[in-house]
Amino acid sequence: MSDKIFQEKIDAEKKIEPKDWMPEGYRRHLVRQISQHAHSEIIGMQPEGNWITRAPSLRAKMILLAKVQDEAGHGLYLYSACETLGVTRDELIQQLHDGNAKYSSIFNYPALSWADMGAIGWLVDGAAIVNQVSLQRTSYGPYSRGMIKICKEESFHQRQGYEIMAEMAKGTPEQKEMAQDALNRFWWPSIMMFGPQDSDSPRTGNAMKWKIKRQTNDELRQSFIDKTVPQAEVIGLTIPDPELKWNEKRGHYDFGEMDWEEFWNVVNGHGPCNKQRLAHHKRAHDNGKWVRNASQAYAQKQEKILKS
Ligand code: BYC
């Protein structure tokens, strides 16, 4: 098959499956994006995992525990989707540990209070859903199908976060202040999750041509802002952007400029928690070596029994 026939298939909205012919650039683009997405889910367990033992009630603890377990599941679907492109899980983890694979910038910010569990669910999962709903229509079959399942769980995550924020916002003045403080710290990093502006995004051209991405970074960011501003108004919290204003003509909110220097610093490994997140992942991976060895030995033993 040639690039031309491949592109015709994409343009006809046909899904590409693991055994189909694909250009090497398409395969590499997907391995990069899907593995970064998988790493984000797994590293994303850390800021929330940190609060499981300190949840304020048994109900809150059970919900948070379930959410963090869901993130592990999302990581596993995504690693599996990535492995269909001819790369092994070990190689992907090694790329993360060597600093050659990225994960979402948002997880390099600390979770300082219980209200941050609300802000993460509401804003971070909210941003993730906007992106992932769009990715349900991505051209690579296993990624697209993974996204459909992930989105179902992600909407529950967004609601649990919004519930925490709503409860705190109508609580004592101190609780409302905690909720506002969490919103102040997580707002800008959340809208940075959508990546650089379209004019500075080197990957968007091919991603749109190959229908890996169905909407650009700026389109998705705008859609998230339009959805989220009214939600903040309902619970009486203020989005920390003095330039935020409804634009009747555009039918969208106008918003202020992001701190792009901060964005690239965090993306390139110099955010507040980059070192800590990676060190924790390496430690957990090393500690889990005996489990991987044991399951491998068990599988080999089973194979021997089946052959004998
Ligand atoms: N953070 O040309 P661009 C979740 C990188 S987690 C870090 O626009 P692209 C959850 C980008 O990778 C949800 N890096 O690239 C879990 C590229 O680097 P390389 C995570 C970023 O790929 C637990 C370079 O900058 N979601 O749901 O077209 C708890 C140039 O950018 C970021 C996904 O991963 C960033 N924010 O667009 C709660 C979604 N932005 O590889 C929630 C899947 C950009 O060229 N990924 N970079 O060195 C995507 O949709 C796209 O990859 C992005 C970036 C929109 C993120």
Image: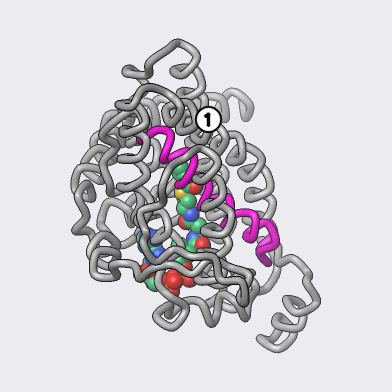
Callout 1: 10 Å neighbours few (<14), some, many (20+)? some
The count of marks equals 1
Q: Is residue 210 magenta?
A: no
Relative to 240, say whether 207 is above or below: below
Name the residue at 29% across, 40% down. 281
| Magenta segment main secondary structure | helix
SS at mark 1 in the image: helix
Q: Can you give x and y, in whole percent of width and height, for residue 235 in the image? A: 51, 37
Position of residue 278 in the picture relative to residue 92 (left or right): left
Q: Mark 1 points at which residue?
A: 163
The reply to whether residue 32 is in sight is no
User: Foreground residue, 277 or 305?
Assistant: 277
* Residue 83 locus on image (x, y percent): 54, 53
In the depicted structure, whether residue 162 falls above or below residue 10: above
Residue depicted at x 76% and y 77%: 9
x then y, percent, for residue 7: 70, 82
* Magenta residues, start to end: 116-141
Q: Which residue is drawn at 67% across and 73% down?
A: 21
Residue type highlighted by circle 1: Glu
Residue located at (51% from left, 77% from top): 204
Residue 5 to residue 53: above or below = below
Work out which residue is located at the far top of the displayed protein and give it. Answer: 58
Left or right: 268 in relation to 212: left
Queried whether the magenta region covers residue 132, the answer comes back as yes
Q: Position of residue 206 (x, y in %)?
A: 55, 80
